[in-house]
Image (cartoon, helix red, strand yellow):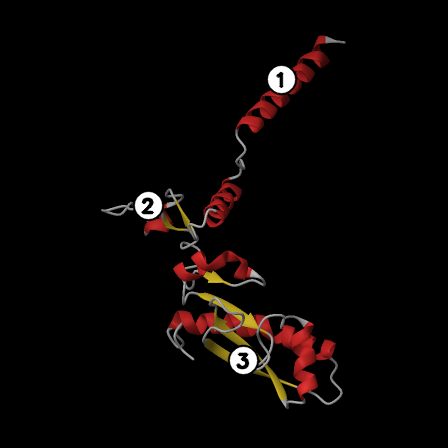
Amino acid sequence: MHRAVRTPILLYVLALAVRLVVGAGFPDPAYPDSAYYVDVARQLAAGHGLNIDFVWIFPEVGGSIPANPVLPIPSNAHWMPLASIVMAPFMWVLGPTTLARYAGRILNIHPGPLPRFGGEGMYGRRVHEAVLAAGVAESGIVIHLVDEEYDHGAPIARAVVPIIAGDTAADLEARVRAAEPGFFVETLKQLSRGELSLSTG
């Protein structure tokens, strides 16, 4: 093999070998954002809640190191200051430690009137099937605080979604889904402006 070809290939193989050795000995993600989320996940898995044991970036501590720094500090506070978590489906798996630590600051959106059409097992199309089976005049969307019980936390905001004659569960589900994003964003804006509070019912 010609030297002009052999040298780059050898350098590539050497670099690959070094990368494999380093990767085997250092399991954390190389990309900073990925490493951050991995660290948060480890804290959650260990039962320590949403916090991290080091200052990742200055916005987490107000833009500068505080006079009396204390670790750990809340994670994600620099990019979600309004509420500690805006809940995604099935986030109840965070468990009682995290729920207790962030009581009154975790929001969920439910695709039907509460409390009548909520509780364990009431999610997705099941909610809309139950609403139509009950023969009520209208459905709705509820944004509420999360606690240890399914769909039990105090409501923050409600929106009415009309039921149209002949609706199937799929029709109603599509109408609710179309209304949810805008309603959620507007509710968050109202919270940020002080027009609603996390204790508002």
Snapshot quadrant of residue 121 = bottom right
Give the labeled residue for mark 3.
115
Report the quarter where the N terminus lies: top right
Three-letter residue code for mark 1: Leu
Of discs 2 and 1, which sits in the foreground?
2
Q: Nearer the viewer, residue 42 or 14?
A: 42
Q: CA distance from mark 2 to mark 3?
A: 39 Å
Question: Residue 40 versus residue 66: which sits nearer the camera?
Answer: 40
Label 2 with label 3: CB-CB less than 8 Å: no
Q: Nearer the viewer, residue 172 or 33?
A: 172
Residue 198: which quarter of the image? bottom left
Could you tell me residue 127's position as x and y percent? 65, 76
Residue at x-position 40% and y-position 76%: 196
Crowding at mark 2 (Cα within 10 Å: few <14, some 14-19, many 20+) = few
> Label 3 amino acid?
Pro
| Residue at horizontal 68 percent and vertical 74 percent from the top | 126
Residue placed under numbered mark 2 in the picture: 71
User: Is tag 2's residue or tag 3's residue first in the polypeptide sequence?
Assistant: 2
Q: Is residue 61 above or below residue 89?
A: above
Q: Is residue 105 above or below residue 199?
A: above
In percent of width and height, residue 90 lies at 58, 62
**Disc 2 or 1, which lies upstream in sequence?**
1
Q: In the rendered picture of this protein, how many numbered marks are placed on residues?
A: 3
Marks 2 and 3: which is nearer the front?
3
| Residue assigned mark 1 | 14
What percent of the width, then of the height, locates residue 104? Answer: 40, 67
Seen at 64% across and 76% down, the residue is: 176
Q: Assess whether mark 3 and mark 1 are in contact (beta carbons under 8 angstroms).
A: no
Q: Earlier in the sequence, mark 1 or mark 3?
A: 1
